[in-house]
Image (tube, rainbow, N blue to C red):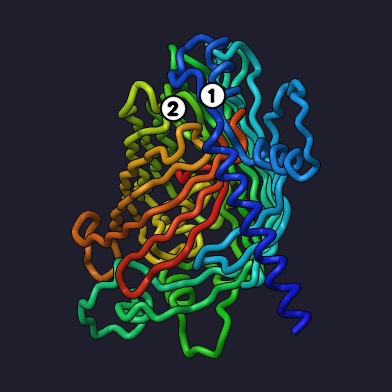
């Protein structure tokens, strides 16, 4: 009984804690709702917003009955928090994460540079440590982006294609295409490094080149199977099923006018990358893959800047050669594993892959402490049984809540619920918008 009382008391404390945050957030008055290109006006606007840090300070003063009006110092662009996360692909995640943003020049002429680093462990046995950055020098003359990752991965695998039911007389192809969407679990260790350097040609437009190194080791499928999609694909394409390298060069073109990388209110982001896996750099085989990333943001209100309609396209198209099985493009295979909310990572994949998403973002509280989203996406891939790209599509949709975590960098705590076909659905938690 005493244990039950302690639990209820703790629950009530947490409940009223968040109720007070919401009440205090709602009481804040925004003096100015418009963001202009003037740095002074932008800073003034940010000071009127309300984030989780403000909530903790107000609750602390409320608990201490502190009525003094202390002048707040300059807010830091760095957020340090427990890396608690969940999605159907990784399970529950715990760890530590640091994200931040800084301007290396005047805000009127220089984009925000961002960085993130994290160390985490999940209930599926995944361990990940990474450092990533996206840096813009003064006047955006140069853009340098890349990162390092070391991870022990546990990846769900559903074979290639889009879940077709095309009959075949070849048992191996039936296993690889996996029309019943049977689930396999692959384990492997990955060591990755990539770095890209862009030179500005004109306002918003960059060209550049880079290098990528991806070493995959200790690859295996968990369980006792006569054959698996990983084994079939590796045998058909002459890849080592237990270890291989994917190293090479890349050439890039980028166009960027969006106003913020964490939560854009307007503008465009476009990136086209030609990745060239090279045997002379240690890659298992030669392969050329063209990747495209396009994002567009339409502001829907002159007084509520976070009232936005956003569009995202991500694609990866095979030009020539063959990638290793774990490098095939598909659901959740973008840099931050955000494409395809509604499905687990890798649920659909092929030699070529196309994805599009539209998201409606709307304010709930006037000071942007709470906002919401509604989104829908669609994806397609080819397979080895004759299905071509754009021939078969799979949709998903969902809705979510946003909590302003750091107003200096527009960092949101994102809570989404999405669902797709084949019984796929789940909760997706993360920091910063999906795109």
Q: Which residue is mark 1?
A: 198
Give me the C-alpha separation between circle 2 and circle 1.
8 Å
Task: Identify which residue is drawn at 27% across, 62% down.
Answer: 394
Task: Identify which residue is drawn at 54% across, 44% down.
Answer: 403
Image coordinates of residue 43 in percent, x first then y, are 59, 17
* Label 1 crowd bin: few (<14), some (14–19), many (20+), radius 10 Å: many
- Vertical position of residue 47 compared to residue 85: above or below: above
Q: Quadrant of the N terminus?
A: bottom right
- Vertical position of residue 78 compared to residue 330: above or below: above
* Dot 1: element: strand
Residue 152 can be seen in this image? no
Q: Quadrant of residue 215?
A: bottom right
Badge count: 2
Q: Are marks 2 and 1 in contact (CB under 8 Å)?
A: yes
* Dot 2: element: strand
- Vertical position of residue 390 compared to residue 31: above or below: below
Frontmost residue, 381 versus 85: 85
Q: Which mark is residue 186?
A: none
Image coordinates of residue 55 in percent, x first then y, are 65, 40
In the rendered view, does 304 fall on the left or right side of 135?
left
Task: Identify which residue is drawn at 30% across, 56% down.
Answer: 379
* Label 2 crowd bin: few (<14), some (14–19), many (20+), radius 10 Å: many
Label 2 or label 1, whichever comes before in sequence order = 1
Image coordinates of residue 83 in percent, x first then y, are 67, 54
Q: Which residue is mark 2?
A: 254
Q: Quadrant of residue 180?
A: bottom left
Image coordinates of residue 35 in percent, x first then y, are 46, 18
Frontmost residue, 236 versus 251: 251
Task: Identify which residue is drawn at 46% across, 72% down.
Answer: 157
Residue 164 can be seen in this image? yes
Q: Quadrant of the C terminus?
A: top left
- Vertical position of residue 398 compared to residue 145: above or below: below
């Amino acid at each position: 009984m005493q244990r039950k009382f302690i639990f209820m008391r703790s629950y009530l404390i947490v409940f009223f804690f968040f109720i007070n945050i919401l009440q205090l957030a709602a009481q804040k008055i925004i003096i100015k709702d418009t963001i202009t290109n003037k740095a002074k006006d932008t800073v003034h606007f940010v000071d009127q917003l309300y984030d989780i840090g403000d909530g903790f300070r107000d609750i602390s003063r409320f608990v201490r009955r502190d009525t003094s009006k202390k002048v707040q110092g300059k807010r830091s662009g760095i957020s340090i928090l427990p890396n608690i996360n969940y999605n159907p692909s990784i399970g529950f995640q715990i760890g530590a994460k640091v994200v931040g943003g800084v301007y290396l020049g005047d805000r009127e002429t220089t984009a925000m540079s961002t960085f993130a680093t994290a160390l985490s462990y999940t209930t599926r046995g995944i361990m990940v440590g990474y450092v990533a950055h996206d840096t813009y020098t003064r006047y955006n003359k140069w853009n340098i982006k890349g990162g390092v990752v070391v991870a022990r991965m546990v990846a769900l695998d559903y074979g290639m294609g889009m879940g077709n039911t095309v009959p075949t007389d070849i048992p191996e192809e039936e296993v690889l295409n996996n029309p019943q969407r049977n689930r396999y679990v692959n384990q492997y260790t990955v060591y990755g490094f990539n770095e890209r350097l862009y030179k500005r040609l004109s306002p918003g437009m960059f060209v550049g080149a880079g290098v990528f190194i991806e070493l995959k080791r200790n690859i295996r499928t968990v369980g006792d199977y006569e054959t698996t999609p990983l084994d079939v694909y590796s045998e058909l394409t002459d890849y080592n099923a237990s270890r291989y390298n994917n190293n090479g060069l890349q050439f890039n073109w980028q166009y960027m006018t969006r106003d913020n990388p964490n939560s854009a209110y307007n503008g465009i982001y476009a990136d086209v990358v030609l990745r060239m896996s090279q045997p002379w750099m240690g890659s298992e085989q030669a392969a050329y893959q063209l990747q495209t990333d396009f994002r567009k943001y339409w502001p829907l209100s002159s007084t509520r800047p976070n009232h936005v309609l956003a569009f995202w396209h991500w694609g990866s198209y095979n030009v020539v050669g063959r990638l290793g099985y774990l490098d095939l493009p598909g659901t959740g295979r973008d840099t931050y594993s955000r494409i395809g909310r509604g499905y687990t990572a890798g649920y659909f994949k092929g030699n070529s892959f196309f994805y599009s998403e539209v998201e409606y973002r709307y304010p709930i509280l006037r000071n942007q402490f709470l906002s919401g989203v509604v989104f829908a996406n669609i994806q397609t891939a080819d397979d080895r049984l004759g299905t071509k790209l754009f021939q078969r599509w799979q949709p998903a949709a969902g809705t979510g809540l946003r909590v302003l975590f750091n107003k200096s960098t527009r960092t949101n705590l994102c809570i989404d619920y999405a669902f797709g076909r084949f019984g796929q659905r789940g909760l997706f938690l993360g920091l910063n918008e999906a795109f």
